[in-house]
Amino acid sequence: EDKVVQSPLSLVVHEGDTVTLNCSYEVTNFRSLLWYKQEKKAPTFLFMLTSSGIEKKSGRLSSILDKKELFSILNITATQTGDSAIYLCAVDPFGNEKLTFGTGTRLTIIP
Amino acid sequence: EAQVTQNPRYLITVTGKKLTVTCSQNMNHEYMSWYRQDPGLGLRQIYYSMNVEVTDKGDVPEGYKVSRKEKRNFPLILESPSPNQTSLYFCASSPGGWGGYEQYFGPGTRLTVT
């Protein structure tokens, strides 16, 4: 059974800090790993990672995948209160169209 | 506007009373999926559909049915709801033919079964 573990479960930091969120996984026939941000409503897509060692970047957010060690990190620099959300990680295997999500990291940014 | 819509957004019902939550997307996406989200358990996939007339079970399909007769619609049916199906439900669609592509989520349906 595919498994995704995110850490920490929750994190509280001050505005301007840099944070690193972790996602480790166990999946048969890995195809991709995805990060989503969930504020009060529906999750919104951040990144899709398929290749090891290649950083994806969007503004202050970046993510990298390590397929050998089976994990990914999501970095947020110069955090802002608008970054407060639950960050979800999911893995997608080949040959099985099911998507498995982790339980998420709840990030709170204090002004 | 490109979007996934769900109805109703909120529903309180009683045990055993059949209900349907509708989901519709206007982006011509092939892949659609239903999730439930519960505290401490994250998002769990109920059913997914890679294209019209093709559906398959996710991780928690018990007690649910789906159908995909048209590309744009993917209703979730609870034939005999029970209190353990009280949850927040999301429908999602993806332009790729699989879930690992970027998914667009609907606004959610909060269901309470008493």
Image (spheres, rainbow, N blue to C red):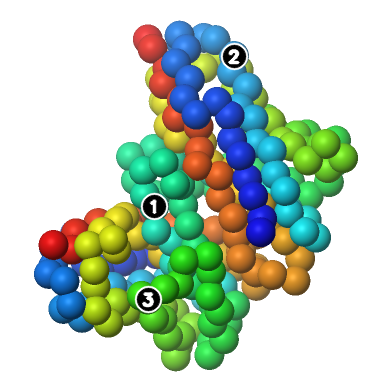
Mark whose residue sits in front, 2 or 1: 1
Q: Which chain carries label 1?
A: B
Compare residues B46 and B72 and report the one nearer the observer: B46
Residue B100 position (above or below residue A97): above
> From the viewer's perspective, is B80 left or right of A37?
left
Q: The residue tagged with tag 2: helix, strand or loop?
A: loop
Residue A83 position (above or below residue A54): above
Q: Mark 2 lies on which chain?
A: A
> Mark number for residue B37?
1
What residue would you read off at disc 2?
A: A18
Identify the residue at horizontal 37%, vertical 10% (top origin): A111
Identify the residue at horizontal 50%, vertical 42% (top origin): A103
Q: Which x, y percent locates residue B17?
A: 16, 78
Mark 1: amino acid: Gln
Q: The residue tagged with tag 3: helix, strand or loop?
A: loop
Mark whose residue sits in front, 3 or 2: 3
> From the viewer's perspective, is B53 left or right of B39?
right
Q: In whole angstroms, how far apart are the C-alphas of marks 3 and 1?
A: 15 Å
The answer to whether dots 3 and 2 both sit on one chain is no
Contact, mark 3 vs mark 1 (Cβ under 8 Å): no
> From the viewer's perspective, is A55 left or right of B55?
right
Q: Which x, y percent locates residue B63?
A: 36, 75
What residue would you read off at disc 3?
A: B64
Q: The residue tagged with tag 1: helix, strand or loop?
A: strand
